[in-house]
Image (cartoon, grey):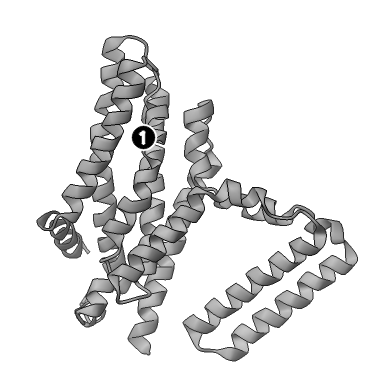
């Protein structure tokens, strides 16, 4: 795993991908820092950092798009599949290299609160927690992008699909506000989610019996709950999907100085889930 980590990290900085990501994120944040903290005198660097979330929408797809799609296109993924290390270690090595690239600008950001402190009042605890959560959010996005890269051999498709999903997550609160709150709409939404899960199981296992069973049992259970107690489905979509507003964990710190421990646990859980899904997606190609 260490060898793969070193190779991947080196490749990021032998190309322009790593330097461009690091330089652009630092420069973009620096502009906000000068405008809000230095010029306007706002004492929270965490507020400045929230303006840099939009950089992740382009920057994260940039560093994840080649992680597995390039290997698949160049047929070098066969070497990874037959390497004398487990597939999980291969995926972790690549993922940790991405996380390191994301960590570099965040280490630089640790200097900014000290600059604010040298000029007057600063809130170092909140600022440093926000930097840590900002880094974790970047790692979450990287795990999602890595998974999507493992599904295709086209770097362009990997980039566009990751950008699209991150954009949806960025706008998630606004999207949820447009969802209907009636019980029947909640039921329809649940049935759609069950169908998506069944299709994914079929794609990963090529087992129509298993995926069909999941679909039938899920639909029957969903309809039965609706018949017995339909009010369960009222506002269900908003409540169920509300946790997907991943950026809210970070913005709660910047806006209200509130650290949501469950939100941090959610970040770590999402990372674990998408690293696992990446391993399974590659494992499927090994046996197909």
> Which image quarter holds the C terminus?
bottom left
Quick check: 259 left or right of 286? Answer: right
Q: Position of residue 173 (x, y in %)?
A: 58, 46
Could you tell whether 92 is left or right of 180 in the image?
Answer: left
Relative to 264, residue 36 above or below: above
Direction from residue 249 to residue 37 in the image, left or right: left
Residue 201 position, x and y percent, is 54, 79
- Mark 1 Cα-neighbour bin, 10 Å: few <14, some 14–19, many ≥20: many
Point 47% across, 30% down: residue: 254
**Which residue is nearer to you in this view: 107 or 14?**
14
Asked if residue 85 can be seen in this view, the reply is no
The residue located at (50%, 52%) in the rendering is: 169
Q: Nearer the viewer, residue 257 or 25?
A: 25
> In the image as oriented, which residue stretches furthest toward the left?
14
| Disc 1, SS | helix
Looking at the picture, does residue 270 appear above or below residue 83?
A: above
In which quadrant is the N terminus drawn?
bottom left
Q: Which residue is mark 1?
A: 131
Q: Is residue 277 above or below residue 106?
A: below
């Amino acid at each position: 795993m260490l060898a793969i980590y070193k190779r991947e990290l080196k490749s990021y900085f032998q190309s322009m991908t790593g330097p461009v990501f690091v330089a652009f994120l630092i420069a973009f944040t620096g502009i906000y820092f000068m405008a809000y903290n230095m010029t306007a005198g706002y004492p929270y660097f965490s507020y400045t950092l929230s303006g840099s979330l939009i950089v992740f929408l382009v920057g994260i797809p940039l560093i994840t798009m080649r992680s597995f799609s390039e290997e698949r296109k160049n047929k070098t993924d066969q070497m990874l599949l037959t390497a004398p290390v487990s597939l999980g270690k291969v995926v972790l090595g690549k993922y940790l290299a991405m996380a390191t690239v994301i960590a570099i600008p965040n280490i630089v950001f640790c200097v900014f609160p000290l600059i604010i402190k040298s000029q007057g009042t600063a809130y170092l605890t909140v600022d440093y927690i926000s930097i840590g959560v900002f880094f974790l959010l970047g790692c979450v996005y990287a795990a999602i992008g890595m998974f999507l890269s493992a599904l295709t051999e086209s770097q362009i498709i990997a980039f566009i699909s990751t950008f699209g999903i991150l954009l949806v997550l960025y706008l998630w609160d606004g999207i949820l506000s447009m969802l209907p709150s009636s019980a029947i709409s909640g039921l329809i939404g649940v049935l759609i989610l069950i169908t998506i899960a069944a299709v994914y199981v079929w794609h990963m296992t090529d087992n129509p019996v298993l995926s069909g069973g999941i679909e039938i049992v899920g639909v029957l259970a969903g309809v039965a709950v609706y018949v017995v107690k339909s009010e369960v489905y009222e506002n269900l979509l908003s409540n169920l999907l509300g946790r997907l507003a991943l950026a809210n964990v970070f913005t709660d710190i910047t806006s209200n100085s509130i650290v949501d421990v469950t939100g941090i646990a959610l970040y770590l859980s999402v990372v674990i889930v998408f690293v696992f899904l990446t391993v399974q997606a590659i494992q499927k190609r090994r046996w197909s």
